[in-house]
Image: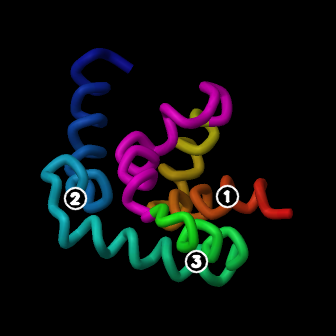
Amino acid sequence: MDDYAAFVSLANLLNSHYFYSFCTLDTEEFSKHIRIYEILFTQHVPEIKDKFTELGIQNDQYLLDWYMTAFSKALSVPLASRVWDCFLLEGEIFIHSVAVGILKMFES
């Protein structure tokens, strides 16, 4: 892929509904992503959800970084690449699944 095509692809990706809400710091749109995550978080890892609530950890304290970078900073390069591949294939719901999956790994 030449430089121009790569730039156009990146620009289109950043202009997608998912990334646009983060790039513009649209708190209303970001809140929608947090609500989706909270539903999944409560359903799939209630013990960790309860512990986070007890410790006063709010979802936006870690989700903004995870979601804005699609886990590029939080995961190793091979794993982050796989997340990106699946995200591009399956859409933004996959990002929510990864976030819950990471926390599920720490469930006892």
Q: Would you identify the image quadrant in which residue 49 lies?
A: bottom right
Residue that badge 1 annotates: 103
Is there CB contact under 8 Å for labels 2 and 3? no
State the image coordinates of residue 17 (x, y, percent, origin top left). Answer: 26, 61
Image: magenta residue range: 58-79
* Sequence-first tag of 1 and 2: 2
Residue that badge 2 annotates: 21
Circle 2: residue type: Ser
Residue that badge 3 annotates: 40
Circle 3: residue type: Leu
Q: Is residue 100 left or right of residue 62?
A: right
- Please name whichever residue, 7 or 105, is drawn nearer the observer in this view of the structure: 105
**Which quadrant: the N terminus?**
top left
Kindly identify the residue that appears in the image at 22 percent across and 21 percent down. Answer: 4
- Please name whichever residue, 31 or 79, is drawn nearer the observer in this view of the structure: 31
Tag nearer the camera, 2 or 3: 3
Q: Secondary structure at mark 1?
A: helix
Q: Is residue 94 left or right of residue 7?
A: right
